[in-house]
Amino acid sequence: MSNRSAEDRVTDMLFQQLKQHKPQFVLAILPEKSSELYSPFKRICETVIGIVTQCIVPPKKLNEQYLTNVALKISLKWGGYNTVLAQEEKKMLPKVSAKPTVIFGLDVSHGSPGDAIVLHQ
């Protein structure tokens, strides 16, 4: 194995591939959740190069819920809307509908039932 850092390896690989291809989106399939490749990959792609990315670790059991969650994340990163208030669509919220408005909320993404992974450091 190389003595070079994961960040150096990721940087070289990304810039080598980007000379030939100019993707707008990269789906990265990582070998494990605690992969040392994740942080440099995300930082370089999204802040240095400007490519939208989604990293996944294949689950032990692939199911519809997992694929739906990944698709929703990708949709948001491309500017899509995963949820629209019915009242907003009908312009029934005057203060929100009259001016550009940002509504902040919180959602927690949960894994599939029984998919409990604990990372030990």
Image: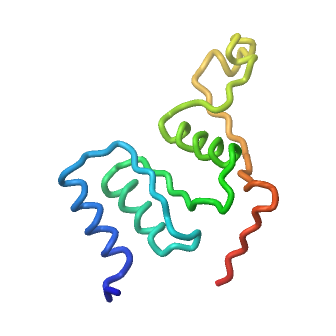
Pick the front one: 87 or 70: 70
Residue 85 as seen in the image, left or right of residue 55: right
- Image vertical order of residue 35 relative to residue 21, above or below: below
Pick the front one: 31 or 3: 31
Pick the front one: 23 or 7: 23
Instruction: Quadrant for residue 65, please give it.
Output: top right
Residue 74 as seen in the image, left or right of residue 7: right
Measured from the top left, where is residue 11 in percent x and y?
A: 30, 68
- Image vertical order of residue 112 relative to residue 84, above or below: below
Pick the front one: 96 or 15: 15
Work out which residue is located at the far left of the displayed protein and give it: 19
Measured from the top left, where is residue 100 in percent x and y?
A: 57, 24
Measured from the top left, where is residue 16 in percent x and y?
A: 21, 62
Instruction: Quadrant for residue 93, please give it.
Output: top right
- Image vertical order of residue 21 relative to residue 37, above or below: above
Instruction: Quadrant for residue 15, please give it.
Output: bottom left
Residue 57 as seen in the image, left or right of residue 18: right
Q: Residue at 59% across / 30% down in the picture?
A: 81
Work out which residue is located at the far front of the displayed protein and give it: 61
Image quarter of the C terminus? bottom right
Q: Residue at 31% across / 74% down in the picture?
A: 9
Image quarter of the N terminus? bottom left
Measured from the top left, where is residue 19 in percent x and y?
A: 18, 54
Q: Residue at 59% across / 46% down in the picture?
A: 70
Count all numbered tags in the image, as a single digit: 0
Q: Residue at 56% across / 62% down in the picture?
A: 57
The colour scheme used here is rainbow
Residue 18 as seen in the image, left or right of residue 36: left
Work out which residue is located at the far right of the displayed protein and give it: 113
- Image vertical order of residue 24 relative to residue 31, above or below: above
